[in-house]
Amino acid sequence: MAEFTHFDAAGQAHMVDVGDKNETRRVARAEGTIHMLAETYAMILGGNAKKGDVLGIARIAAIQGSKRTSELIPLCHPIPLTKVSVEFDTGTACEIRCLVTAETVGRTGVEMEALTAVSVALLTIYDMCKAVDRGMSMHGIRLLEKAGGKSGHWVAGAAAEEA
Amino acid sequence: MAEFTHFDAAGQAHMVDVGDKNETRRVARAEGTIHMLAETYAMILGGNAKKGDVLGIARIAAIQGSKRTSELIPLCHPIPLTKVSVEFDTGTACEIRCLVTAETVGRTGVEMEALTAVSVALLTIYDMCKAVDRGMSMHGIRLLEKAGGKSGHWVAGAAAEEA
Amino acid sequence: MAEFTHFDAAGQAHMVDVGDKNETRRVARAEGTIHMLAETYAMILGGNAKKGDVLGIARIAAIQGSKRTSELIPLCHPIPLTKVSVEFDTGTACEIRCLVTAETVGRTGVEMEALTAVSVALLTIYDMCKAVDRGMSMHGIRLLEKAGGKSGHWVAGAAAEEA
Amino acid sequence: MAEFTHFDAAGQAHMVDVGDKNETRRVARAEGTIHMLAETYAMILGGNAKKGDVLGIARIAAIQGSKRTSELIPLCHPIPLTKVSVEFDTGTACEIRCLVTAETVGRTGVEMEALTAVSVALLTIYDMCKAVDRGMSMHGIRLLEKAGGKSGHWVAGAAAEEA
Amino acid sequence: MAEFTHFDAAGQAHMVDVGDKNETRRVARAEGTIHMLAETYAMILGGNAKKGDVLGIARIAAIQGSKRTSELIPLCHPIPLTKVSVEFDTGTACEIRCLVTAETVGRTGVEMEALTAVSVALLTIYDMCKAVDRGMSMHGIRLLEKAGGKSGHWVAGAAAEEA
Amino acid sequence: MAEFTHFDAAGQAHMVDVGDKNETRRVARAEGTIHMLAETYAMILGGNAKKGDVLGIARIAAIQGSKRTSELIPLCHPIPLTKVSVEFDTGTACEIRCLVTAETVGRTGVEMEALTAVSVALLTIYDMCKAVDRGMSMHGIRLLEKAGGKSGHWVAGAAAEEA
């Protein structure tokens, strides 16, 4: 099994040296879901109209959040994101699933940027709806896929092949 | 059922007026869990020593993240936090549970600060361990309790009495 | 005529001492307008639907920008905003007027927060439409009114009474 | 006429994919003007001496503001600026014109960085002088020229050739 | 001797609870010095004119830096500064001494805000002069005095009475 | 002797044009020391256990601080750091020396990133120990070495060869 790369031989945290890595196109997809009451779900879906566009605002928050990843996650490298897109799947009653795709052309991957964007999207939905439903909860925040870089292609569920 | 407070009568987002609210002591507790492989769990618990202190770093990231909440969540008010504490429960195999307590003396609650801190803690654990376990996932990020302010005391599981 | 308060007797910049001022409710209203081609104007008004909600995104950017005012304007005090609202007036062809109301309960005014929000709203509209209309221009960014604090009520156009 | 590039086919906002664009040198020049009372204008010009260096501070604020552009404008890409310069033209009575040149070697343009720097410069002048002149107003904030990248050279006033 | 307050009984870091403390006026003064070559010293003193105002820019950086203290220092509380002033003492050849006074009306002190401002001022001087003098060094960054709050008045050199 | 590069011919500050420089690997090493009472020194060394890990937290703060350098230092270019490592030398009684190595592959050097990280590390140690020792002071914050870029290799103490 691999070692934690964020610590040196003495167990001290460091920002890993990526100076020797190539600048390649790197993509990451992540997802997460927020569960809520039926009434909350109905109110959100009725949005974009009089009731306010909860998902539109969560999408903007997610994109802006992805740009702050290296400020939030201590050992993340600052990365010039070349693309961020955010989708919401509302097909299942009482839950909203958020999917984010992040890309860069750089020396390290964008998994954390995708996961941070998902988390900020779900937190924003929580914030906007908490006055009517404080019991909402977030689940299944995880990486779906990554591509590019030395460690290659990784797809969730096919994790056994990796490492 | 209540309305979404983050939209005005025309459905436009706004930062809600809290100028008339009293400055009172407000507390929020939130939690969330990250699931991982047995090997990853063992490596984290072996930390604080040679392998690096994953949870110590996640704790710092959570505290720092809580201070950035109003930058990340579009309609959150800036709040002068008076206390943030972060605990990790490692009693269940293959998962780490994070509990955050946030407090302020202010005009609005600190639910989002507590939830943001939990999310940043879990994301930081993911980041530090992803080289060995990309399939980790986060679950059960939710508010446990809030106290203070006009809407009073709320405890998860007792949500029916509220609203 | 008054002196520039942001400099001391030796002409050196400082963050003015407001520790002796009372915490009172303070309000500021500001406005600004962006001019554009007829086609751009039509495309924005057709938004909120398939073409994308330009004004909804500019509103969020304005609210978030108001919270960053003290980071952007060197001698501004950090202020805990208690309310920010953003309206767009689209009643005149080929221009969009943005109106912001900002409030705090604090020791100094929120004029800069209101003006910063207006500027960020207009810049965001420019950004979202620049692919079709690089020649847009912004005008009339100004304070409309302020209330609260020692210097009292001020209304644009009634400036003679003031100072 | 072109489409708004910041929305996908479904009208949802995204950070546009620039991963396929070449890293080329990109330049943008922008301007804007702040109008003021004769006394205010005289006080600013008398600066740099005992009364404080209003324009020197506004210049620093503009440069720092340009570096925050992608935090303020939701769909802007983070860009490694390679140059920012700020000039003030005080040749016309009762107004100060700010000109900014921004450059990068990157995959997308720096128009927003130049416009943001102009806006922050003018807001800073307003802030420093507002104690003596709350009625100041900002006008003509616009792009003057851009060069580099696929869309080529654009000069204000020659906009007809473009698009 | 007192305990480290930033750790709980189990040795875990936390943001200390200050919710029970009173809002009182708190002041801190700090200083620090940068040493340099005679030529560099001469060039800086010749500033404010053609050669550029090194100290004016360092002053602005210090004020802006003080507002970011709680973002930089992990366990610092966010504090609404009510005053920051920055002076430079150039009376000794080949060194520039920076003195900062910071104030708040709040629940915790502003020592870190004053010390952070001093550090950012000295770093900015270094940055602006490093092309001619990379060997500059910073010394004697320390708290001079603090007042307000439960721990009372403290003056450097009188430290024995304290603790 | 060279000129200050951060000012143009008219003495106005600007962010220097680095667009023509090559992207090369650049390294900087910096150091600084904090002096303290014997009891404070003993308490810090006893850390990582029950008393809390002062140096572990200072290390994280330093790494995070290095990423904010261009926000703190007005004329610094934003730089995509490829590596940051932080060591503490506790071999001398009553003082802790911090050493930082920063690297990038870019168009300008990382001296300021290394020096900023050192400063934030020392400030964080001060913050965590100030309840027991307000008289701590910081000394010898300086660049040790830089490599890469047009100005070549520089080592402290060998400064005469340079410039």
Image: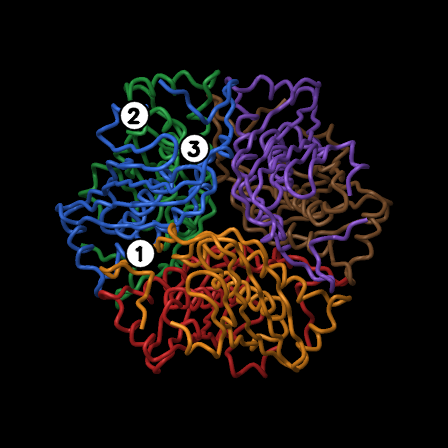
Chain colours: A brown, B purple, C orange, D red, E blue, F green
The chain containing the residue under callout 2 comes to: E
Q: Disc 2 residue type?
A: Glu
Residue drawn 45% across the image and 60% down it: C149
Find disc 1 in the rendering and name its residue. Answer: E57
- Dot 2 lies on which element? loop
Task: Indicate which disc, 1 or 2, sits on the residue closer to the N terminus.
Answer: 1
Q: Position of residue C10 (x, y in %)?
A: 22, 59
Discs 3 and 1 lie in a common subunit: no
Quadrant in which the N terminus of chain D is drawn: bottom right
| Residue count near mark 3 (Cα–Cα under 10 Å), binned few <14, some 14–19, many ≥20 | many
User: A145 or D77: nearer the eye?
Assistant: D77
The chain containing the residue under callout 3 comes to: F
Q: Disc 3 residue type?
A: Ser
Quadrant in which the C terminus of chain D is drawn: bottom right
User: Which is more foreground, mark 3 or mark 1?
Assistant: 1
- Dot 3 lies on which element? strand
Residue drawn 59% across the image and 83% down it: D160
Side of B63 where D48 appears, left or right: left
Circle on res. E162: 2
Q: Position of residue A7 (x, y in %)?
A: 51, 27
User: A87 or F20: nearer the eye?
Assistant: A87
Find disc 3 in the rendering and name its residue. Answer: F85
Q: Position of residue A51 (x, y in %)?
A: 77, 59
Quadrant in the picture for residue C123: bottom right
Residue drawn 70% across the image and 37% down it: A154
User: Which is more foreground, mark 3 or mark 2?
Assistant: 2
Is the residue under label 1 in contact with that under label 3 (CB below 8 Å)?
A: no
